[in-house]
Image (tube, rainbow, N blue to C red):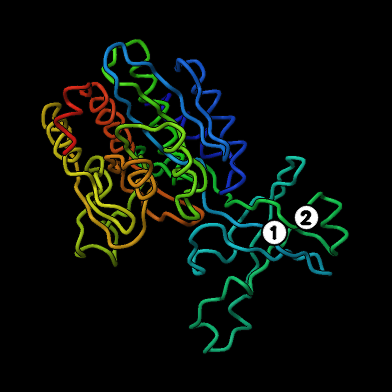
Amino acid sequence: MKASIELLKTLTDVNGIAGQEMQVKETMRDYLNPISDSIIEDHLGGIFGKREATYGTKSIMLAGHLDEIGFIVTKIDNEGFIKFQPIGGWWSQVMLSQKVTITTDQGQEIRGIIGSKPPHVLEAEERKKAVDIKDMFIDIGARSREDVEQHGIEVGNMITPYSEFETLANSKYLTAKAFDNRYGCAVAVEVLKNLKDENLGINLYAGATVQEEVGLRGAKVAAQTIKPDLAIAVDVCVPYDIPGMSGQTSETALGNGPVVIMMDASSIAHQGLRQHIKEVAKKHYISVQWDTTTGGGTDAGSIHVANEGIPTITIGVALRYMHSNVSVLHTDDYENSVRLITEIVRSLNDETYQQIVW
C-alpha cells in the first residue's frame, strides 16, 4: 500500500479546477506513459492510457476525473482583498477561515485565507446565518490592488483548497483535499499497472476526464472520442456513518468495501453490467456496498447517453467530508476497489460482452 499512498499523495497535492486541469493532466501522463500501449487525449483535456486486447474486439473505458472543486478570481478591490466565484458545488458553512492556494498564470502558488469576522463583533441574529459566498473574500496579506497584482494575481486565476495529506489516528484513514476525484485517477493508474503484462480480452482505456464538477462536461467529449462499448465511472460517494447521517436511507460506510452506485440523479446503472459485477465480486470474495442516491451524479451520467448508448456503471469508495477543504478515505476501500475493477476487466471479452448487453 506504500506505493499507492504515494500515488494518492502526488495526485492530491497537485492543483486543478474544472477548465484548469493542466497540472493534473501532466502528472497523469507521467504515470500512464510507462504502462500504456498508447495515450488517447481529447481536445478539452481528458487523458487515457490504452492497453490493446490480445483477443477480442470490444472496449471498456475506466474514467476518473482530473478536476477538483475550487474557485476563480473575479475581482481585486482597492484594499487588496480578492473576491471569487465557486467552481463546483460548495456549502458556505465549510469555507470561512480556510486556507486556499491561488495559482498565477506563471505557475506561482500564493497562499491565502478566506476571511471571517470574529464572534466578538457578531450580532445574535448574524451568528445564526450562514455567510453568502458572494460576501466572502480572500486575504493574501496585501495592502492594495497594486500589491496583489505585483504578485501576478489577476482575474481568472485558479483558486484551490489547501490541505496537507496526512494519516489519522488509525493509519488506514487518509485525509487530503481533492480525493474527489484524484481517487479515480489513481485507480485508473493502478488497474493499468496491474494488467500491463497480461493478455486481455477487451481493449482497455483507463484515465480521467475534465470538468466533471461543473456538469459532467468532459465525459461527453471523452466518450465520443474513445467510443467504448462499456464504461465504468470511478468516483467517490457519500458515507452515512457519521453523527447526523447514520440511520438514513443508506448504510454506506468507510471500511466496508467499494461502492457500486445503482442510481443517482444523472444515471441508472446498466443492469447487465450490475449483474456481471455482482458475479465477479462473489467469485473473488470482494465485499461490495450497493447504494443509491437521489442527488448528485458522476461521469456515468454523460457517458451512458453518448454515441448510440454505452452500458455504464459507477464504482467508487465512500468519502467523508467531500466538497470541502478536507476529505477522509479508507485504504481498505481503495485497495479493494482497485482489486474489483481489475478483476472486472480480466473477466471481459466478446462473449461476456454479449451476455451483459440486452
Name the residue rendered at 14%, 38% in the picture.
Answer: 275
Taking 351 as reference, is 135 left or right? right
Q: CA distance from mark 2 to mark 1?
A: 7 Å
How many marks the image carries: the answer is 2
- Give the residue at the far front of this rendering: 308
Q: Is residue 70 left or right of residue 275?
A: right
Q: Residues within 10 Å of mark 2 (few under 14, many from 20)?
A: many
User: What is the x, y in percent for residue 33?
Assistant: 52, 19
Q: Position of residue 170 (x, y in %)?
A: 34, 41
Give residue 167's mark.
Answer: none
| Residue occupying the point 21% across, 65% down | 248
Disc 2 on helix, strand or loop? loop
Residue 154, disc: 2
Q: Is residue 338 above or below residue 316?
A: above
State which quarter of the image contains the N terminus. top left
Q: Amino acid at mark 2?
A: Glu
Q: Are the residues tagged 2 and 1 within 8 Å (C-beta)?
A: yes
Left/right of residue 107 with respect to residue 203 in the rendered view: right
Kindly identify the residue that appears in the image at 46 percent across and 55 percent down. Answer: 215
In this view of the protein, which residue sits in the foreground, 63 or 122? Answer: 63
User: Which amino acid lies under the numbered mark 1 shown in the image of this protein?
Assistant: Val
In terms of sequence position, does the residue under pointer 2 or pointer 1 come before the other?
1
The residue labelled by disc 1 is: 73
